[in-house]
Image (cartoon, helix red, strand yellow):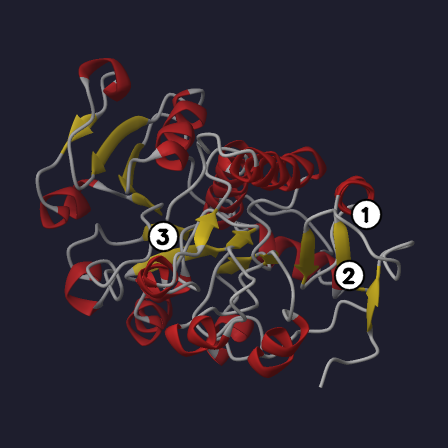
Amino acid sequence: MLTAKLEMAAGSEHMSDKPKILVTRRHLAATEDRLTADYDATLNTDDHIMEADEIVAAADDMDALLICVTEPMDAATIERLPDSVRTVLTLSVGLDHIDTGAAKARGIAVLNTPDAVTNPTAEVGMLLLLGAARRAAEGAAMMRAGEWTSWSPRQMIGKEITGSELGIFGMGRIGQTVAARARAFDMTIRYHNRTRLSFEQEKSASYYTSVEGLLPSSPFLMICAPSTPETQGFLNAERIALLPDGAIVVNIARGELIDDDALVDALRSGKGAGAGLDVFNGEPNDIHPAYLELPNVFMTPHIGSGAERSRAAMGDMLLDGLDLLLAGELVPNRVV
């Protein structure tokens, strides 16, 4: 049953020839203003997580759905969508929450936001890299607990990233932007990617044909690869063993790329000096409990794209794409 918590946009109780769109989460005011002005929009006003049954019911007579990573669109859910739904817009770059094959089979277009999140996600990568290297979580905890009572030459000794080597696993848009930011710290860039970048894109970065070759040369490792069947569980115990002792691991990709038990063991043993994590297996309510306890884990709650300018750009990119699609024109950010 369609919950009363979903409310039609102002004026939409009247017959309208505007495209009808179900919006499953709250968005920035500018995005919602555009939604209510240009479309016959149904908004989730209290921002509750909509389960599949509710989405299917609420999608009746809708032309499009605007979803987030919190609303998985598996094959079963897509199969149950009303025939009126011809487009799914996702406020994300990643597509691991959508069965794109099922969408294609039903003739449903899928649009994402490939460019809008690049800079802010790279910024969070650098935040996590610096925070983990310089033991920011431990320092903040010390001060909040009132335990900073003096200064010592041996207090809170971390790792300096300037002039060090950064290994990047996944050298797409975000990986390349991380590399550009890291070069400002005079870091030497090494990377592994499915395909080698062009000479112009590499900008003197060293390419490794295998990740096993990359890891021993990566005292700092940044994971930027998409989640695919091939990359899931990428950082396991065997690969962690290849890292230099005392390595720093940063993940701004997806939680499932890391074997949590293996990383926790490394952080406890000292094999890994620290980790900077923005994404997690089981997020947000079922992340590995050790991450909440280990002092050498610097965490953020999946905020890679959580900057005002980029979040607004994500909304505009999706709605611009929808407008183009409805006009029968080429849509640059259409993936299916």
Which amino acid type is marked by label 2? Leu
Q: Which badge, 1 or 2, is on the more N-terminal residue?
A: 1
In this view, which residue lies farthest toward the top?
Answer: 200
Q: Residues within 10 Å of mark 2 (few under 14, many from 20)?
A: many
Residue for point 11% across, 50% down: 212
Tag on residue 43?
Answer: 2
Residue at image mark 3: 249
Q: Secondary structure at mark 3?
A: strand
Task: Give how far apart the Cα atoms at labels 1 and 2 are.
Answer: 9 Å
Q: Which quadrant: the N terminus? A: bottom right
| Quadrant hosting residue 24 | bottom right
Residue 284 higher or lower than 128, as above or below:
below
Task: Give how far apart the Cα atoms at labels 1 and 3 are.
Answer: 43 Å
Pointer 1 with pointer 2, Cβ within 8 A: yes
Q: Secondary structure at mark 1?
A: helix
Tag on residue 58?
Answer: none
State the residue in front, 215 or 23: 23
Q: Is residue 230 left or right of residue 43?
A: left
State the residue in front, 13 or 117: 13
Pointer 1 with pointer 3, Cβ within 8 A: no
Residue 294 higher or lower than 181, as above or below:
below
Q: Which badge, 1 or 3, is on the more N-terminal residue?
A: 1
**Residue 332 location, x and y as percent?**
44, 31
Which amino acid type is marked by label 3? Val
Residue for point 54% across, 53% down: 90
Instruction: Mark 1 vs mark 3: give the one in front.
Output: 1
**Residue 113 location, x and y as percent?**
51, 41
Task: Give how far apart the Cα atoms at labels 2 and 3 are.
Answer: 39 Å
**Residue 148 location, x and y as percent?**
71, 56
In this view, which residue lies farthest toward the bottom?
Answer: 1
Residue at image mark 1: 36
Residue for point 29% across, 36% down: 171
